Image (cartoon, rainbow, N blue to C red):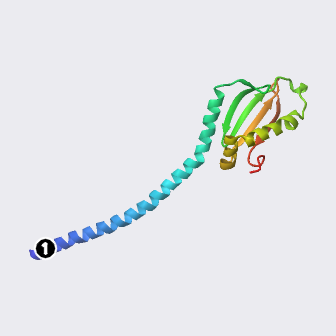
Amino acid sequence: MKSNKLLKGLGYIFLAIVGIVFFIFSGQIGKFYGKKAMTDYVEGRKDGSIEKLMEITADDLRKGLPREVGGVIMYDVLAIDKTLKYFYRVPHKLSEIDGNWLMKDQAPVLKHNVCKHESMSNTIRKHGVTYGYVYFSQDGLLIGEIEIGRKECNY
C-alpha cells in the first residue's frame, strides 16, 4: 500500500515537472511569436498610417470645395496610396491656353511652394508622399499634370 502511495506521489511529481517544463517552453514560444505578431502589427500600422492620413486630409479638403485658388478652381482632392492629387479647372478653353503655361509658369511655383512648406516637405521626405496637381480646361480637357515628390524636392 505504501508503494502505491509512493508511486502515486512520484507520478504527481513527474507530472508537475513535465507541466513546469511545458510551461517554460510554451512561455518562450509564446513570447517569440507574440513579439513577432506585435512587430508585424506595429510595422503594418506605420505603413498604413500615412495612407490613412492622406485619406483624412483629402476628405477634410474636399469639404471646402469648389474654391478659387490663384485664379483657378480647385474642385476635387483624392488620396491614392501615398499620393494626394488636387484637381483644378482653369477658366479657359484648351484652345485659349498656351501649351507651355503649365510647365513653364505653374510647375516651378508649385515645386517651390510644396518643397518649402514645412508639413508637406516633411511628409515627402519622411514618408515618400507625392503631391499631384491635375489641370483641366473649362471645356473638360486635360491640360497636364505636375507631380512633386522626393526627386523634385531633392531628397
What residue occupies the far bottom of the structure in this picture? 3
Q: Position of residue 20 (x, y in %)?
A: 30, 67
The residue under label 1 is which amino acid type?
A: Asn
User: Camera-side residue: 29 or 46?
Assistant: 46
Left or right for 149, reference 40: right
User: Which of the 4 quarters of the picture holds residue 72?
Assistant: top right
Q: Is residue 9 above or below residue 72?
A: below
Q: Is residue 75 above or below residue 36?
A: above
- The x and y percentages for residue 44 are 56, 50
In the foreground, 94 or 130: 130
Dot 1, crowdedness within 10 Å: few (<14), some or many (≥20)? Answer: few
For disc 1, the marked residue is 4
Residue displayed at 74% across by 48% down? 150
Judging from the image, what secondary structure is the residue with disc 1 in? helix
Q: Is residue 154 left or right of residue 11?
A: right
* Total residue callouts: 1
Name the residue rendered at 21%, 69% in the picture.
12
